[in-house]
Image (tube, rainbow, N blue to C red):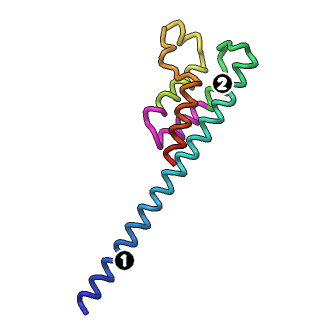
Amino acid sequence: MSAVFNIRILWNVVKDITTYLTGQADKKKENVIEGHKAINTAFILTYDYLRNNNGEYKPNTELAEVWNKASAAIMKVDLELGKMLYNKSRFWLDPRLYFNLSRESEIIELNRIVDEMERLIMKL
């Protein structure tokens, strides 16, 4: 009788752990999807902006804001990528400042953004 009771307790513990881990996995996937969506939105707006402005880098608070949102969303999944996107957000507030300080190498380029979005999809 005691062994049956112990097995029942063990079974409930295993079920609880499995439920918890499954929930964590689902949350991680949700975070990846939200991060990807935010990056893709920022990518589309930036691509469109550059295409319509002949590739000129002018301050743009809308782009700064969408890259900031992308940064915050992706930090839940990838802290380093989140930091790069944060720099991109700051860049759009005053692009000339980054060029004047020779810090443009700190700004992730759009072709690398595409690679990072593909990498995120592979996490699903």
Answer with left or right where residue 122 lies relative to residue 92: left
Q: Mark 2 belongs to which amino acid?
A: Thr
- The x and y percentages for residue 101 are 49, 8
* For residue 60, above or below residue 73: above
Sort mark 1 into few (<14), some (14-19) or many (20+) by Cα contacts within 10 Å: few
| Residue 75, x across and y down, in percent | 48, 39
Q: Residue furthest bottom?
A: 1
| Mark drawn on residue 12 | 1
Name the residue that disc number 2 marks: 61
Quarter assignment of residue 66: top right
Name the residue: 51% across, 24% down.
87
Judged from this view, the residue extending furthest toward the right is 52
Do the CB atoms of the residues marked 1 and 2 lie less than 8 Å apart? no
Give how far across and how far down residue 113 sits, in percent. 56, 29
Range covered by the magenta-colored residues: 67-82
Which of the marked residues, 1 or 2, is nearer the chain's N terminus?
1
Point 68% across, 12% down: residue: 56
* Residue farthest along the left direction in this orientation: 2
**Magenta segment, principal secondary structure?**
helix
What is the spatial separation of the Cα atoms under label 1 and label 2, in whole angstroms? 53 Å
Q: Tell me the residue at 42%/64% (across/down).
A: 20
Q: Amino acid at mark 1?
A: Asn
**In the structure shown, which secondary structural element does the residue marked by tag 2 occupy?**
helix
Which residue is drawn at the image coordinates 64% and 30% (left, top)? 43
